Image (cartoon, helix red, strand yellow):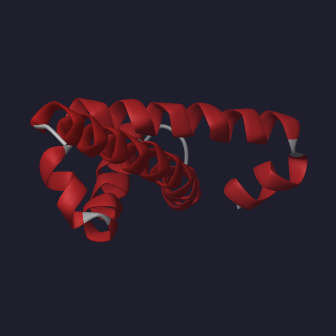
Amino acid sequence: MNIENIAVIVLGVLFIIYIIWTDQAAKWLRYAVSVAEQKFGSGTGKLKLAAVYDMFISKYPMFSKIMPYFAFETMVDLALEWMKLQMNNNPKFKDVIEK
């Protein structure tokens, strides 16, 4: 087996790990964003982002060192869109968040 084949296999495995982690991180971020919204309420975006980032670096210390902050913000924005959709479509979800 030559070096190119090994490189392709390693990159493939890393890509699969990335896809799995991204899915898990996205689900976790949905939770974290919901918790922050429930705790701080609307109009506190920067405070909520800081709180979610603190939770993130506690949960995923290794990834927080290699993930650029703008990538984290993008993932949080996606989680926020999900949360807003849930709040619009599910009154019980909205009630829990807005308690």
Q: Position of residue 48 (x, y in %)?
A: 40, 49
Residue sitting at the far front: 1
Q: Is residue 38 above or below residue 41?
A: below
Q: Position of residue 63 (x, y in %)?
A: 23, 54
Q: Position of residue 46 (x, y in %)?
A: 32, 40
Question: Which sits in the foreground, 86 or 63?
Answer: 63
The quadrant in which the N terminus is found is top left
**Residue at 16% over, 31% down:** 4
Q: Is residue 72 left or right of residue 76?
A: left
**Residue at 65% over, 41% down:** 83
Q: Is residue 52 left or right of residue 10?
A: right
Q: Position of residue 93 (x, y in %)?
A: 79, 53
Question: Which sits in the foreground, 32 or 51?
Answer: 32
Question: Which sits in the foreground, 59 or 47?
Answer: 59
The quadrant in which the C terminus is found is bottom right
Residue 28 in sight: yes
Specify the quadrant of the image occupied by residue 57: bottom left
Specify the quadrant of the image occupied by residue 92: bottom right
Residue 68 in sight: no
Q: How many marks?
A: 0
Q: Is residue 38 left or right of residue 51?
A: right
**Residue at 55% over, 37% down:** 80
**Residue at 30% over, 46% down:** 14
Q: Is residue 49 left or right of residue 95?
A: left
Q: Is residue 25 above or below residue 96?
A: above
